[in-house]
Amino acid sequence: MANYSVEINGIHVDATYSDEFVERLFLPLLKELSDLQKEKGRRILVMLAAPPGAGKSTLVSFLEKLSRENDDITDLQAIGMDGFHRRQEYLLSHTTIRDGKEVKMVEIKGAPVTFDLEKLTAAIKKVSSGEDTFWPIYDRHLHNPVEDAIHITKDIVLLEGNYLLLDMDGWNRLRAMADYTISITANEAMLRKRLIDRKMKSGNDIESATRFVEYSDMANVRLCLEKTVKADMVLEASALI
Protein backbone atom coordinates (compact mmCIF):
# COMPACT_ATOMS: atom_id res chain seq x y z
CA MET A 1 0.00 0.00 0.00
CA ALA A 2 1.15 3.54 -0.75
CA ASN A 3 0.56 5.88 2.20
CA TYR A 4 0.39 9.54 1.29
CA SER A 5 0.14 12.62 3.51
CA VAL A 6 -0.42 16.09 2.10
CA GLU A 7 -1.95 19.46 2.95
CA ILE A 8 -4.91 20.30 0.71
CA ASN A 9 -6.40 23.81 0.87
CA GLY A 10 -4.98 24.29 4.35
CA ILE A 11 -6.19 20.92 5.71
CA HIS A 12 -3.96 17.89 6.42
CA VAL A 13 -5.02 14.75 4.55
CA ASP A 14 -3.81 11.15 4.94
CA ALA A 15 -4.58 8.81 2.04
CA THR A 16 -3.73 5.24 1.11
CA TYR A 17 -3.62 3.90 -2.46
CA SER A 18 -3.31 0.21 -3.28
CA ASP A 19 -0.12 -1.03 -4.93
CA GLU A 20 -2.27 -2.58 -7.64
CA PHE A 21 -3.77 0.76 -8.61
CA VAL A 22 -0.38 2.46 -8.58
CA GLU A 23 1.15 -0.17 -10.86
CA ARG A 24 -1.80 -1.00 -13.11
CA LEU A 25 -3.58 2.36 -13.36
CA PHE A 26 -1.69 5.42 -12.13
CA LEU A 27 1.73 4.74 -13.66
CA PRO A 28 0.30 3.63 -17.04
CA LEU A 29 -1.91 6.74 -17.05
CA LEU A 30 1.10 8.97 -16.42
CA LYS A 31 3.03 7.17 -19.17
CA GLU A 32 0.11 7.69 -21.57
CA LEU A 33 0.00 11.40 -20.73
CA SER A 34 3.77 11.65 -21.16
CA ASP A 35 3.52 10.06 -24.60
CA LEU A 36 0.65 12.40 -25.51
CA GLN A 37 2.69 15.44 -24.48
CA LYS A 38 5.69 14.30 -26.51
CA GLU A 39 3.48 13.60 -29.51
CA LYS A 40 1.92 17.07 -29.40
CA GLY A 41 5.24 18.78 -28.62
CA ARG A 42 3.66 21.36 -26.32
CA ARG A 43 2.09 21.74 -22.90
CA ILE A 44 -1.00 19.57 -22.51
CA LEU A 45 -3.90 20.19 -20.16
CA VAL A 46 -5.64 17.29 -18.43
CA MET A 47 -8.95 17.87 -16.62
CA LEU A 48 -10.15 15.67 -13.76
CA ALA A 49 -13.75 16.19 -12.62
CA ALA A 50 -15.35 14.64 -9.54
CA PRO A 51 -18.05 15.39 -6.95
CA PRO A 52 -17.16 17.14 -3.68
CA GLY A 53 -15.50 14.74 -1.26
CA ALA A 54 -14.35 12.22 -3.88
CA GLY A 55 -10.66 12.78 -3.12
CA LYS A 56 -9.74 14.46 -6.39
CA SER A 57 -7.37 17.05 -4.89
CA THR A 58 -5.46 14.39 -2.99
CA LEU A 59 -5.31 12.12 -6.04
CA VAL A 60 -3.89 14.74 -8.41
CA SER A 61 -1.32 15.70 -5.77
CA PHE A 62 -0.31 12.03 -5.51
CA LEU A 63 -0.05 11.74 -9.30
CA GLU A 64 2.21 14.81 -9.31
CA LYS A 65 4.45 13.10 -6.74
CA LEU A 66 4.56 9.86 -8.79
CA SER A 67 5.54 11.77 -11.92
CA ARG A 68 8.52 13.34 -10.13
CA GLU A 69 9.69 9.97 -8.85
CA ASN A 70 9.81 8.25 -12.26
CA ASP A 71 12.48 9.31 -14.75
CA ASP A 72 10.62 7.93 -17.78
CA ILE A 73 7.54 10.05 -17.04
CA THR A 74 7.21 13.75 -17.84
CA ASP A 75 6.81 15.85 -14.70
CA LEU A 76 3.19 16.79 -14.05
CA GLN A 77 1.89 19.86 -12.24
CA ALA A 78 -1.39 19.57 -10.31
CA ILE A 79 -3.72 22.55 -9.84
CA GLY A 80 -7.36 22.98 -8.76
CA MET A 81 -10.33 25.17 -9.64
CA ASP A 82 -11.12 25.99 -5.98
CA GLY A 83 -8.97 29.13 -6.24
CA PHE A 84 -11.78 30.57 -8.35
CA HIS A 85 -14.31 30.63 -5.54
CA ARG A 86 -15.74 34.13 -5.34
CA ARG A 87 -14.38 35.96 -2.32
CA GLN A 88 -16.18 35.51 0.99
CA GLU A 89 -17.19 39.17 1.18
CA TYR A 90 -18.87 38.83 -2.24
CA LEU A 91 -20.74 35.70 -1.17
CA LEU A 92 -21.91 37.40 2.02
CA SER A 93 -23.28 40.41 0.13
CA HIS A 94 -24.87 38.70 -2.91
CA THR A 95 -27.88 36.44 -3.25
CA THR A 96 -29.15 33.76 -5.62
CA ILE A 97 -32.21 31.54 -5.93
CA ARG A 98 -32.22 28.03 -4.41
CA ASP A 99 -35.39 25.92 -4.44
CA GLY A 100 -37.46 28.97 -5.33
CA LYS A 101 -36.13 31.03 -2.40
CA GLU A 102 -33.65 33.90 -2.36
CA VAL A 103 -30.59 32.94 -0.28
CA LYS A 104 -27.20 34.46 0.37
CA MET A 105 -24.56 32.89 -1.85
CA VAL A 106 -22.45 32.03 1.19
CA GLU A 107 -25.18 29.58 2.28
CA ILE A 108 -24.54 27.46 -0.82
CA LYS A 109 -20.81 28.11 -1.19
CA GLY A 110 -19.39 25.53 -3.56
CA ALA A 111 -22.32 25.61 -5.99
CA PRO A 112 -21.46 26.54 -9.58
CA VAL A 113 -22.88 30.05 -9.20
CA THR A 114 -20.43 30.79 -6.36
CA PHE A 115 -17.41 30.41 -8.68
CA ASP A 116 -16.10 33.10 -11.01
CA LEU A 117 -16.54 31.14 -14.25
CA GLU A 118 -15.38 34.00 -16.47
CA LYS A 119 -12.11 34.34 -14.56
CA LEU A 120 -11.61 30.56 -14.50
CA THR A 121 -12.19 30.29 -18.26
CA ALA A 122 -9.63 33.01 -19.00
CA ALA A 123 -7.08 31.34 -16.72
CA ILE A 124 -7.58 27.93 -18.35
CA LYS A 125 -7.05 29.50 -21.77
CA LYS A 126 -3.68 30.83 -20.63
CA VAL A 127 -2.62 27.45 -19.29
CA SER A 128 -3.75 25.51 -22.37
CA SER A 129 -1.99 27.98 -24.67
CA GLY A 130 1.34 27.28 -22.97
CA GLU A 131 1.61 30.83 -21.63
CA ASP A 132 3.85 31.55 -18.63
CA THR A 133 1.22 32.17 -15.97
CA PHE A 134 0.29 31.89 -12.30
CA TRP A 135 -2.62 30.12 -10.59
CA PRO A 136 -4.58 30.76 -7.37
CA ILE A 137 -5.29 28.30 -4.55
CA TYR A 138 -8.07 28.20 -1.95
CA ASP A 139 -7.40 28.23 1.80
CA ARG A 140 -10.19 26.71 3.91
CA HIS A 141 -8.96 28.50 7.03
CA LEU A 142 -9.00 31.91 5.33
CA HIS A 143 -12.23 31.02 3.47
CA ASN A 144 -10.80 32.85 0.47
CA PRO A 145 -8.58 32.34 -2.57
CA VAL A 146 -4.88 33.17 -2.46
CA GLU A 147 -3.90 34.75 -5.77
CA ASP A 148 -0.82 33.79 -7.84
CA ALA A 149 0.15 31.01 -5.43
CA ILE A 150 1.40 28.59 -8.10
CA HIS A 151 3.71 29.31 -11.03
CA ILE A 152 2.74 27.06 -13.95
CA THR A 153 5.98 25.65 -15.33
CA LYS A 154 5.45 22.03 -16.40
CA ASP A 155 4.54 20.52 -19.77
CA ILE A 156 1.68 18.46 -18.31
CA VAL A 157 -0.85 20.35 -16.20
CA LEU A 158 -3.53 18.36 -14.36
CA LEU A 159 -6.48 20.54 -13.37
CA GLU A 160 -9.06 19.14 -10.95
CA GLY A 161 -12.47 20.47 -10.00
CA ASN A 162 -16.11 19.61 -9.44
CA TYR A 163 -17.55 21.22 -12.55
CA LEU A 164 -14.90 21.01 -15.25
CA LEU A 165 -17.02 18.52 -17.22
CA LEU A 166 -20.40 19.90 -16.18
CA ASP A 167 -23.04 19.83 -18.91
CA MET A 168 -24.42 23.31 -18.21
CA ASP A 169 -24.23 26.61 -20.09
CA GLY A 170 -20.81 28.22 -19.79
CA TRP A 171 -19.24 25.27 -17.99
CA ASN A 172 -19.66 23.04 -21.04
CA ARG A 173 -17.14 25.20 -22.95
CA LEU A 174 -14.25 24.20 -20.69
CA ARG A 175 -13.85 20.65 -21.96
CA ALA A 176 -12.77 21.84 -25.41
CA MET A 177 -9.58 23.26 -23.88
CA ALA A 178 -8.50 19.89 -22.45
CA ASP A 179 -6.26 17.40 -24.21
CA TYR A 180 -7.44 14.53 -21.98
CA THR A 181 -10.29 14.17 -19.45
CA ILE A 182 -10.86 12.02 -16.36
CA SER A 183 -13.93 11.74 -14.14
CA ILE A 184 -14.52 10.06 -10.79
CA THR A 185 -17.86 8.63 -9.70
CA ALA A 186 -18.72 7.80 -6.09
CA ASN A 187 -21.42 6.62 -3.70
CA GLU A 188 -23.49 9.46 -2.19
CA ALA A 189 -23.38 8.07 1.36
CA MET A 190 -19.59 7.82 1.30
CA LEU A 191 -19.30 11.39 0.01
CA ARG A 192 -21.68 12.70 2.69
CA LYS A 193 -19.53 11.17 5.46
CA ARG A 194 -16.32 12.58 3.96
CA LEU A 195 -17.81 16.05 3.51
CA ILE A 196 -19.04 16.28 7.10
CA ASP A 197 -15.60 15.25 8.34
CA ARG A 198 -13.93 17.84 6.09
CA LYS A 199 -16.29 20.59 7.26
CA MET A 200 -15.49 19.77 10.89
CA LYS A 201 -11.76 20.03 10.15
CA SER A 202 -12.44 23.62 9.02
CA GLY A 203 -13.60 24.48 12.56
CA ASN A 204 -17.33 23.60 12.51
CA ASP A 205 -19.10 21.45 15.11
CA ILE A 206 -20.86 18.30 13.91
CA GLU A 207 -24.33 19.89 13.91
CA SER A 208 -23.40 22.90 11.76
CA ALA A 209 -21.19 20.74 9.53
CA THR A 210 -24.01 18.27 8.92
CA ARG A 211 -26.53 21.05 8.28
CA PHE A 212 -24.32 22.71 5.66
CA VAL A 213 -23.47 19.43 3.93
CA GLU A 214 -27.11 18.37 3.73
CA TYR A 215 -28.31 21.74 2.41
CA SER A 216 -25.41 22.75 0.16
CA ASP A 217 -22.77 20.08 -0.53
CA MET A 218 -25.10 17.18 -1.29
CA ALA A 219 -26.93 19.23 -3.92
CA ASN A 220 -23.56 19.79 -5.59
CA VAL A 221 -22.74 16.09 -5.27
CA ARG A 222 -25.93 15.11 -7.09
CA LEU A 223 -25.35 17.76 -9.75
CA CYS A 224 -21.88 16.36 -10.47
CA LEU A 225 -23.07 12.75 -10.53
CA GLU A 226 -25.99 13.53 -12.84
CA LYS A 227 -24.60 16.27 -15.11
CA THR A 228 -20.94 15.36 -15.71
CA VAL A 229 -20.36 14.34 -19.33
CA LYS A 230 -18.44 11.16 -20.13
CA ALA A 231 -14.67 11.54 -19.88
CA ASP A 232 -11.83 9.75 -21.66
CA MET A 233 -11.24 7.80 -18.42
CA VAL A 234 -13.82 7.07 -15.71
CA LEU A 235 -12.76 5.96 -12.21
CA GLU A 236 -14.73 4.80 -9.15
CA ALA A 237 -13.69 6.54 -5.91
CA SER A 238 -14.22 3.54 -3.63
CA ALA A 239 -11.90 1.40 -5.77
CA LEU A 240 -8.97 3.81 -5.57
CA ILE A 241 -8.12 3.22 -1.91
Image (cartoon, rainbow, N blue to C red):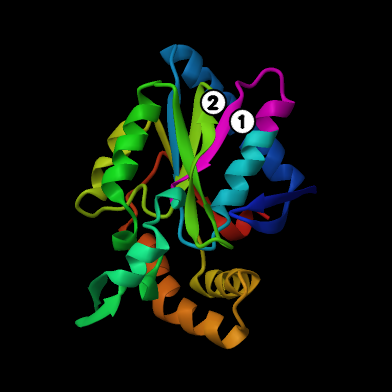
Give the camera-side residue of 114 and 37.
Answer: 114
Splitting the image into 4 quarters, where does residue 40 fall?
A: top left
Amino acid type of the residue tagged 2 in the rendering: Glu
User: Can residue 184 be seen from the camera position used here?
Assistant: no
Answer above or below: position of 176 versus 35. below
Return the x and y of residue 49 as percentages of the image width and height: 43, 49
Give the camera-side residue of 215 and 239.
Answer: 215
**Residue annotated with mark 2:** 32
Answer above or below: position of 170 versus 14. above
Give the camera-side residue of 224 and 117.
Answer: 117
Give the camera-side residue of 220 and 204.
Answer: 204
Residues at badges 2 and 1 in contact (C-beta under 8 Å)? yes
At a point 62% along the width and 83% down the height, the residue shown is 205
Amino acid type of the residue tagged 1 in the rendering: Pro
Answer above or below: position of 96 versus 207. above
Dot 2 crowding, Cα within 10 Å, few <14, some 14–19, many 20+: few
User: Can residue 48 be seen from the camera position used here?
Assistant: yes
Splitting the image into 4 quarters, where does residue 105 fall?
A: bottom left
**Residue annotated with mark 1:** 28
Image side of residue 143 versus residue 130, left or right: right
Dot 1 crowding, Cα within 10 Å, few <14, some 14–19, many 20+: some
At a point 48% along the width and 45% down the height, the residue shown is 160
Answer above or below: position of 172 versus 103. above
At a point 58% along the width and 43% down the height, the residue shown is 60
Disc 2 to disc 1, C-alpha distance: 6 Å
What segment is highlighted magenta in the picture? 66-81
At a point 59% along the width and 75% down the height, the residue shown is 193
Instruction: Find numbered disc 2 in the image and state the secondary structure of the residue it sits on.
Output: helix
Instruction: Find numbered disc 1 in the image and state the secondary structure of the residue it sits on.
Output: helix
Q: Is residue 229 magenta?
A: no
